[in-house]
Amino acid sequence: YLTFISRLSHVYLTFRLLLSHVCEQRFSNERHPPSSKTSSRFHPRIQQRNMLIRSGFRRSRRAMPRLSAYRYSYMYRSQVSCWKHPEASLLVSIPVLGPSPLASNTSPVITSTSHSSVSWYSTRYFSSATFCNNNKVRIGHVELDLSKNPAQDPYLIPKSYLPSDPSQRSPTLLRHLQWMLSKDALGQDMMLVGSPGSGSLHRRNLALMYAEMTQREVEVLTLSSDVTESDLKQRKELAHKPIRNVVAATAAAVEFADQAPVRAALGGRILILDGLEKAERNVLPTINNLLENREINLEDGRLLVSPKRYNELLSSRSFDADNTFLVPTHPNFRVVALATPAPPYPGRGIDPPLRSRFQIRRVDNPSAEEIYSDLINSGANVDIASQLSAFAAAMDSAASDFSSGPSSSGRTLVFPSNALVSAAHTLDNFPREDCRSVLARLYPAALPDERFERVFGPSSKESSRKSFDRACDELGIIGKVVDKECSHMYEIDTIERSASDPFVATVSFSAAPLEVPSSFFGGRNDPNSSGPSVKVSCGSNELHRRSPSFVRTQGTSSVFTSMMQEHAAGRDILLISPRGEGKSTITAEFASLLGYDTALFNLYREMSGRDLLQRRATDPTTGETRWEDSALVKAACHGDLCILDGVERLASDTVTTLHSLMTEREISLPDGSKLVRADRMRTSIVPSSLIRPVHPSFRVIALASLTKDRSFLLSDDVMSAF
């Protein structure tokens, strides 16, 4: 009965939208005579569009000629015109514009605030979301049984990604998870597309949330331009094997090590392909057959076939069950690809045959309400949270406007909304700080320095700076962005180690008294009180050491204060300046203040994403090949301060391979092991060779020099990582 009513409601909604389409065509055919002096804003079609904008719905800009080929709908996006993929679910993309066919006395509330109103359809299905109840996951009418295929390697299941509090699970999040649950139940692979920068982090966390919700193991493969076919199938390794019929004798032989796609296919895990638009177009077709037919030829001679085909061959007695040539893939093997559409964003276009293997869904950045809820849950002030969330929504609207054309040269760069928690932490603890300058640290495209045009491009930087200033002016964010911080309201006073934790220190700042009312600072902490004190991570060496050869100036003291504020908020730092302006010296002095052991990692142009994490080496005694950790991985395990010197020499997609390590302190290594944040380690027995915890005091400071050429591009993903 419920299925019949659901299908009937779909027919009802389609009829209503078709009727509105016909009415709109009639309005569009009404032409004003050329001699008419009526303003264009009084045109019936313009009036209808404005009415839809005021009600919170705006029609997609993409033309949809036939209802049978494309699902005609109004996008739920407040005052932002954006594209929609045809594979989007009808349940999510079409809100109810009238009374419910199931309840004649009920009508939805339509407001102009994004995602603030939930239709009767969403309320009916998503209010009863249940996670892991009696080994079953249920969201609305979609249900998945978890008891049929328990996890074989529980340490590969993500942890602490899904919000434990049901009140923090927004309707948008539940709709995404329900769509993924339905596609998983149908045995289909998925692709999540959206904006770069913080949107990439949001999509990756969404995929990991789904894996945690369904208790599935995960294999993550971060793609870049240096990914080869061996990274998708198998890699050769040299190892010693015993010789037959010879006692205590070994010989060097070639072994094939399975990579992430093969391990996921054999173990029934979820394979996450992160950054599909960054890979070369001639590399990804290697796994086309694995995605479509679940079949692939491996270098060691094995052939992976689908479970259905394997059972058919086994029943027809075409081969013996002991034959190791044919290997069935696991029926629970799924692929979740994460991509950014190019164009309008920079990147390589996805090959159409590869794109057809996925069910595609668009994932927008978090709305203002979701960002506000995250800021409040992190302990931010109410006024600061409301101002920052509104600012993020305004910048997201500016970045989503492609009215100037699809070219990426003049677009507005995406603001890193994932860093707003650190901005709220800084503004709450340091009430005298200029809000606009703090936001400019997260968004260096707003700086008026003309030298930054080399890393952004002149038109892109100009449009980004104008959007930043317009959003600040409309929201009343006071302050002025300057290219150099010549003066600062605070200076570092004392640094003392905590008695309970040797890797935590308390930094006290000194501040001069100000004769201004506290209301001037928007309800933040009393600015006339004594200097603030914050807790920061530190090393095991002596604290507050100062080099006798280092001469402090007003400018360097201001830089130290800004770096300490970002360090207290848990952010990694990227220092950009022309060569010879003291980036390395300031970093070394900052490390000595906090007692850090430094790990210098010099970068060069030919480095790949693998070289940033591990490099191939040969055992001098046995001749076997092995993987050696880089300075970055060693610093992450020991809790040191890693200095990435020469970031401008790397390609932007090579730097973004470290995005998950910078933002979530979690990354997969080339040897098959994984670095995981300490609080996300599973309490069960975990193999130390496969899962290694990241030290809580681990930090990264990257150094980049401004050069004459534009070899280094500060992309949206790089801005969201530092």
Image: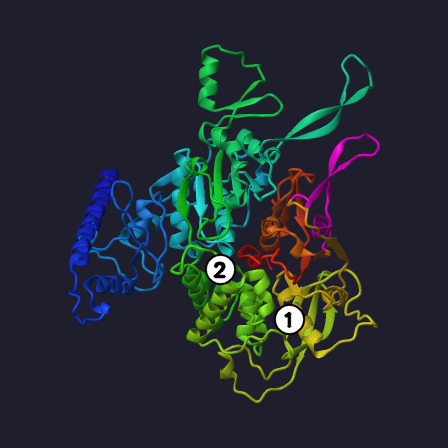
Whether residue 321 appears in this view of the structure is yes
In the rendered image, which quarter contains the C terminus?
A: bottom right
Q: Which residues are magenta?
A: 610-639
Q: Quadrant of residue 425?
A: bottom right
Q: Position of residue 311 (x, y in %)?
A: 46, 18
- From this viewpoint, which residue is outermost toward the front? 35
Whether residue 149 appears in this view of the structure is no
Q: Position of residue 187 (x, y in %)?
A: 42, 33
Q: Position of residue 458 (x, y in %)?
A: 53, 64
In the depicted view, which residue is nearer to us: 161 or 474?
474
Q: Residue at position x 59%, y 84% from top?
A: 528
The residue indicated by pointer 1 is 562
Q: Which mark is residue 97?
A: none
Q: Please tell me whether residue 614 belongs to the stretch shown in magenta.
A: yes
Q: Residue 706 vs residue 479: left or right?
A: right
Q: Quadrant of residue 3?
A: top left
Q: Position of residue 667 (x, y in %)?
A: 61, 46
Kind of residue sitting beneath label 1: Ser
In the depicted view, which residue is nearer to us: 639 or 354?
354
In the depicted view, which residue is nearer to us: 204 or 177?
204
Q: Residue at position x 31%, y 46% from top?
A: 91
Q: Give how far apart the Cα atoms at labels 1 and 2 are.
A: 23 Å
Q: Residue at position x 77%, y 67% from top?
A: 543
272, above or below 643, in the image:
above
Q: Residue 573 vs residue 57: left or right?
A: right
Q: Which mark is residue 414?
A: 2
Badge nearest the viewer, 1 or 2 = 2
Query: Crowding near pointer 1: few (<14 within 10 Å), some, many (20+)?
Result: some
Q: Secondary structure at mark 2?
A: loop
Q: Please tell me whether residue 704 belongs to the stretch shown in magenta.
A: no
In the depicted view, which residue is nearer to us: 333 or 589?
589
Query: Crowding near pointer 2: few (<14 within 10 Å), some, many (20+)?
Result: many
